[in-house]
Image (tube, grey):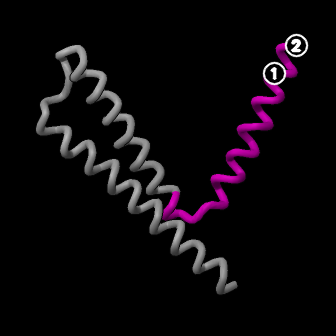
Amino acid sequence: MVSVTGGLARRVFRRLGREVGSWPPLMRIGLGVFAVGGSADVAYHAGVQTGWGIPAASAFWVHLITLVGMVVTMLGVLIGGRWKRRT
């Protein structure tokens, strides 16, 4: 039973890797920036609840990084769509 689960996971990750590899590079960069900003945002909000969080001034930068990641991702989608239509 373990080999079936391992094989399924391997197939899923292989297919996911092929799919993400076909995305425009700018979109992949934007998603990476968004993931970093989103993770920092979750850490910030989790820390605020317990009192040991990041200082409030850092919240601005964390949200700005997340927003930049979103914008870069959208630029990658738009630019990648234009390149595909030209070919």
Left or right placement of residue 41 versus residue 29 in this view: left
Q: Position of residue 47 (x, y in %)?
A: 25, 21
Q: Are marks 2 and 1 in contact (CB under 8 Å)?
A: yes
Q: Secondary structure at mark 1?
A: helix
Q: Residue at x 48, y 64 (%)?
A: 26
Quadrant where the N terminus sits is: top right
CA distance separating discs 2 and 1:
7 Å
Left or right placement of residue 50 versus residue 79 in this view: left
Picture quadrant of residue 30: bottom left
Q: Residue at x 54, y 66 (%)?
A: 77
Picture quadrant of residue 21: bottom right
Q: Residue furthest bottom?
A: 86
Q: Residue at x 31, y 36 (%)?
A: 41
* Residue 15, above or below 81: above
| Mark drawn on residue 1 | 2
User: Dot 1, how many residues are within 10 Å of its Cα: few (below 14), some (14-19), or many (20+)?
Assistant: few
Quadrant where the C terminus sits is: bottom right
Q: Position of residue 27 (x, y in %)?
A: 51, 60
Circle 1 sits on which residue? 5
* Residue 19, above or below 46: below
Left or right placement of residue 25 versus residue 61 in this view: right
Q: Residue at x 60, y 74 (%)?
A: 81
Q: Position of residue 74 (x, y in %)?
A: 47, 64
Q: Position of residue 53 (x, y in %)?
A: 20, 23
Q: Nearer the viewer, residue 11 or 75?
A: 75
User: Dot 2, how many residues are within 10 Å of its Cα: few (below 14), some (14-19), or many (20+)?
Assistant: few
Picture quadrant of residue 68: bottom left
Task: Give the overall secondary structure of the magenta segment.
Answer: helix
* Residue 17, above or below 83: above
Q: Secondary structure at mark 2?
A: loop
Q: Nearer the viewer, residue 17 or 58?
A: 58
